Amino acid sequence: MDAWHQLRQLTTARIALGRSGGSLPTSERLAFHLAHARARDAVVSGFHAAELAARLRRFGETFVVDSAARDRAEFLRRPDLGRKLAAASREELEQLAVKLPPPDIVIVVSDGLSTHAVMTQCEPMLAALLPLILGSGWTYGPLIVARQGRVALQDEIGALFKARLSVMLLGERPGLGSADSLGAYFTYAPAPGRTDAERNCISNIRAGGITPADAAAKLHGLIARSLHLQISGVSLKDDATPAIGSDTFTVE
């Protein structure tokens, strides 16, 4: 077996596909079209926000809100509308926030660009993350499930709750072979106008990437550093080092 075929055992990337004459084998061509169809479905499929919110209520109070994008088509054409709340949802959260003490962390869950990812990955991610948050003595606000959300939507929601830090779990833009990839973003001192350079991300959360349990542990370590240093984004360095012979991480 040549080196390329050995590498293929370690990755889902399209390497060592073989050939039939000067073309790809039929099986690989069909596999490509299937992956492409799955990626398209992940982007355009409807988001069952109420169903997800019902599942997440075992973790605490949960609310469903909408971004300013009126439907999926507008969300895809107008990324800016996915970065802010619809007027009615903003009013609802304003009324809720004034009744609650400011939490350390507010968590937002949204479909983003893969409804499949958020429907399958966010529940095990939260099941692993929330005990770590409580174990550190931090508080978190009501879980917010947002339809048609982009990453920056966490800034407006975090500011409404006066949270020290906001976390956004949302479906990432699907690749060919990774239509179920979840991203976890966080921002210290969230406020409208924060830039991508002021937030951090753990990407590729899925069975074929970083598992929800490992991602939760890594996110918890980064949040601890962020709250301690009062920074996030490019100023916050990831000092986690993998233990030798292990997939776990320690944070120094």
Image (cartoon, rainbow, N blue to C red):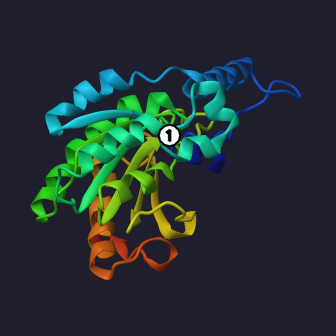
- Say few, some or many: other residues with alpha carbon within 10 Å of mark 1 (under 14 / 14 to 19 / 20 or more): many
Residue at 56% from the left image edge and 63% from the top image edge: 196
**x then y, percent, for residue 65:** 39, 34
Quarter residue 170 falls in:
top left
**x then y, percent, for residue 110:** 43, 38
201 and 139: which one is in front? Answer: 139
Residue 96 position (above or below residue 231): above
Residue 117 position (above or below residue 229): above
219 with respect to 20 (left or right)? left
What is the count of numbered marks?
1
**x then y, percent, for residue 209:** 44, 46
Read off the residue under disc 1: 149
Quadrant where the C terminus sits is bottom left
Does residue 19 appear in this view? yes
Residue at 43% from the left image edge and 77% from the top image edge: 236
Residue 228 position (above or below residue 20): below
Does residue 1 appear in this view? no
Identity of the residue furthest to the right in this view: 22
Quadrant where the N terminus sits is top right
**x then y, percent, for residue 44:** 59, 23
200 with respect to 35 (left or right)? left
97 and 175: which one is in front? Answer: 97
Q: Secondary structure at mark 1?
A: loop
Residue at 50% from the left image edge and 20% from the top image edge: 46
